Image (cartoon, rainbow, N blue to C red):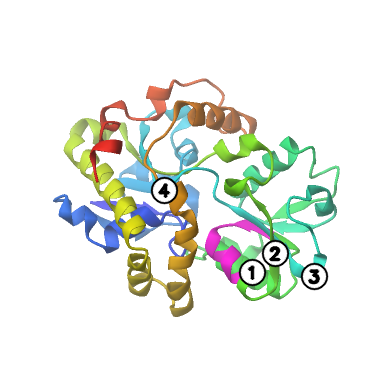
Amino acid sequence: MRIAVPDLVSNSYFPAIAAAALGAFAAEGLDLSLELVSPLPACMAALRDGSVDFVGCSAHAPLLAFPEWHGAKLLCAQSQGTYWFLIMRKDLNIARGDLAQLTGKRIAAVPFVGAALTQLLVAGGIHPEKNGISITVPEEARKPGVNFGVFAAQALRERSIDGFFANGMGAELAVRDGIGTVVLDVRRGDGPAEAFHYTMPAIATTDRLIADRPDVAAGVVRAIVKTQHALKRDIELATKVGRKLYPQREAELIAGVVARDLPFYGPRIAESSVGTMKRYSRAVGLLSGDPSYDDIVAPQFRNLWSAAS
């Protein structure tokens, strides 16, 4: 069996990545291998078509392949909150949280993530079109397997963009290299409060697998929760994972990036968060109806969110 992530060299879906690399799935008796499938629409299509069995992804990403949440469920969260950073070129001197200064700027983001930035700006009273804000995807970043955050940090260095909205590793590289500054970090209070609940990193699978292999789905949840606890106890495990899977520089940085996320690590998916996520999904055109909480989050595994340790 396989669990896929659309982004590997990143903190975004690290609990799933670490669960595979550290043997947490194997400890649950699961023969579950980790696979990178990108871009995100291809990853979700792979879940729909059965070529992968689980996906570590944004909580609303299943809508790309399972309209109106028909056929897929979330099993648990990997961490809480919208997790992308807006990084702008340092020489632009844009103060943290100052959305008005984005007027006329070129910001790189993959379409799925760019939709979140657009909605975030609109909620903050800034309309990208009216303010001449261009949110685009550089052609090079569209290639399969390209880590967008790492690519965007390089594009910022080359001044082909003014900023980017992407994962924590790209943000870390840009800030460490002195070429970028954090303008928005939604998890830590920047931007409209509602934006925190637009999405979160989660684990998704199909209704079919839940019906046919509930024991396997339960094992995945237990493995994720145990990995979250393990990383909180010993952050150096993140370096161990990085050295197995990442280029050298990113491998040595990942523990610091993950350490900042640890306060957000937890498997619960709150009903209030799902309510905001549904409103956001409708606003960006991914959802038209109003599925219930139980249509989105598999109810039979919620007791495992607190039972595993």
Secondary element at tag 3 = helix
Vertically, is 241 above or below 133? below
The residue located at (78%, 48%) in the rendering is 99
Kindly identify which residue carries mark 4: 265
Residues at circles 4 and 3 in contact by the CB criterion of under 8 Å: no
Residues at circles 1 and 2 in contact by the CB criterion of under 8 Å: yes
Residue 9 position within the rendered picture, expressed as x and y whole percent measured from the top left: 45, 65
Kindly identify which residue carries mark 3: 91
Of marks 1 and 4, which one's residue comes earlier in the chain?
1
The residue located at (36%, 30%) in the rendering is 71
Of marks 1 and 3, which one's residue comes earlier in the chain?
3
Of marks 4 and 3, which one's residue comes earlier in the chain?
3
Which one is in front in this view, the residue at disc 4 or the one at disc 3?
Answer: 4
Q: CA distance from mark 1 to mark 4?
A: 23 Å
Q: CA distance from mark 1 to mark 2?
A: 6 Å
Q: Amino acid at mark 1?
A: Val
Residue 39 position within the rendered picture, expressed as x and y whole percent measured from the top left: 49, 55
Q: CA distance from mark 2 to mark 4?
A: 24 Å
Q: CA distance from mark 1 to mark 3?
A: 12 Å
Q: Amino acid at mark 4?
A: Tyr
Whether residue 171 is in magenta: the answer is yes
Kindly identify which residue carries mark 1: 175
Q: Quadrant of residue 304?
A: top left
Q: CA distance from mark 3 to mark 2?
A: 9 Å
Left or right: 11 in relation to 229:
right
Vertically, is 149 above or below 124? below
